[in-house]
Amino acid sequence: MTLHPRIALFSVNYPPEPTGVAPYAGALAAGLKRLGFGVTARVAQPHYPQWAHYKGYGQWTLSENLDGIDVHRHRHYVPRHPHGIRRLLSEVSFGLRLVSSKWRDSDAVVAVSPALFATALVALRMRVARRDTPFIVWVQDLYALGMAETGEGAGMAGAITRWVESRTLRAADRVAVIHPRFQRHAVDELGIDPKKIVVVRNWAHLPASALVDAALAKEVLGWPSDVMLAVHTGNLGVKQGLENVVDAARLADELDAPVHFILVGDGCERDKLTARARGVERLSFVDPLSDAEYPRALCAADVLVVNEMPGVTAMAVPSKLTSYFHAGRPVVAATDPNGVTAEEIALSGAGMVVPAGDPKALLDALLKIGTDAEAAAHFGASGQLYRQAVLSERAAIGRWATLIEDVLIRMPSSSADRSLRAVGAVVVGGLIALLPFTHHHPSS
């Protein structure tokens, strides 16, 4: 094994994107660098969650150094409305940029999924070159399961997508997943060898120093201080099903309830949500916040909200939960009671779960917590304890270092499916499968 292994990290999302996968990809690169690894990141130009290039970015290729990491940004197709064929072309275009770049001197490759089809193209290039470089896939989202849970996985498209996902992960030497439920799904439904799956939980990525007094945070942000604030942060996408929050705010108007909802972020459903919210007084939309402002938003909240569309149970773990727990605020989750989000709330003891798609239940839970200061404080403290015990960044980065070192040592006996035919079939099958498919980005 090389004394200082050189790692190539491929991710469609990377800082300065403030939400979703990006903070974890950036923290992994920086954490491995601190442990002595050489890290090069090949990433897209920042565009998420608003699906538009950030100001100052968008060049065909841009190289910069962030936190000691050599970051190479590649422009790819970014659709304003990432649905169907546009989303497919976006992933494929990023994959083509990756496979045409130079990264032959890496000792190991870590590819983040999403983007699954960019990852498949990377796998294909590695197998065409017949290289023995270890290939690790970091699964932040389950594609086929996402199709099924959002009602788009019926028939041939769902079956092919599941097959594509299975073959892509089988082509990897190791598969890192962010939750034990993902591990069970990968083994039971995708046929992945359990010996090569490692669970590495996502972690809270906010510094403790970022937490401030609630009253001060509200004042700095200019948010109301005379009502309870129910704050949702992150992606405004299909999976989040935020029509439920809009309807809860409308119901609060009708009942003259002392609560104000704030949706912080952007996403492909924002225009529809703002249209639906026309005339609703107890709801505000706030653009994505800077790294300095985001912790203030969490601290300004009296209750933090997670919302998922009905039927979503296990396709993704909302990345916002790690930050919510860190902030020490009670959480109300409108989600499937048997889903992974509800499981996280129960394990953490950080709040309450109500059924997805029930605005009255959501409003009732918020008002209940808002009038019980003792319960709110207990939920907030429990979330912080869970974050410290289970969602530690130091432990996660250490687990990643062990994973990489282990695969470098064991590479000759890897169980990866290295068939060119298998990986090539992944790409071709994927192009067919995703034509009618709107993939939903990991919750954030």
Image (spheres, rainbow, N blue to C red):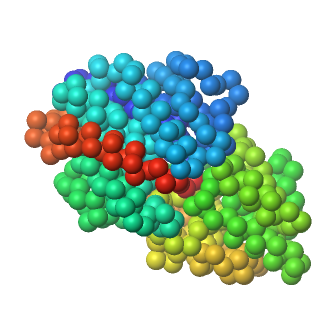
Left or right of residue 235, residue 165 in this image: left
Residue that lies at the very extreme toward the left in this rendered image: 413
Residue drawn at x 76%, y 72% is: 247
Q: Is residue 39 visible?
A: no
Where 85 falls versus 109 (above or below)? Answer: below
Image quarter (top left, top right, bottom left or bottom right) of the N terminus: top left
Quarter of image, res 193: bottom left
Front residue (pair 228, 208): 228
- Dividing the picture into quadrants, the one containing residue 329 is bottom right
x, y percent for residue 184: 30, 64
Where does the image place residue 272, in percent across and percent down from the top left? 74, 58
Q: Compared to 232, does 37 lie above or below?
A: above
- Residue at x-position 15% and y-position 36%: 411
Foreground residue among 369 and 361: 361
Front residue of 203 and 159: 159
Count the marks: 0
Q: Is residue 251 above or below residue 138?
A: below
In the rendered view, does 138 fall on the left or right side of 387? Answer: left
Residue at 56% across, 33% down: 77
Q: Is residue 299 left or right of residue 319?
A: right
Q: Position of residue 389 (x, y in %)?
A: 44, 59
Residue 87 at least partly seen: yes
Q: In the image, what residue occupies the spot 45% across and 46% down? A: 114
Left or right position of 259 against 31: right
Q: Position of residue 383 (x, y in %)?
A: 55, 64
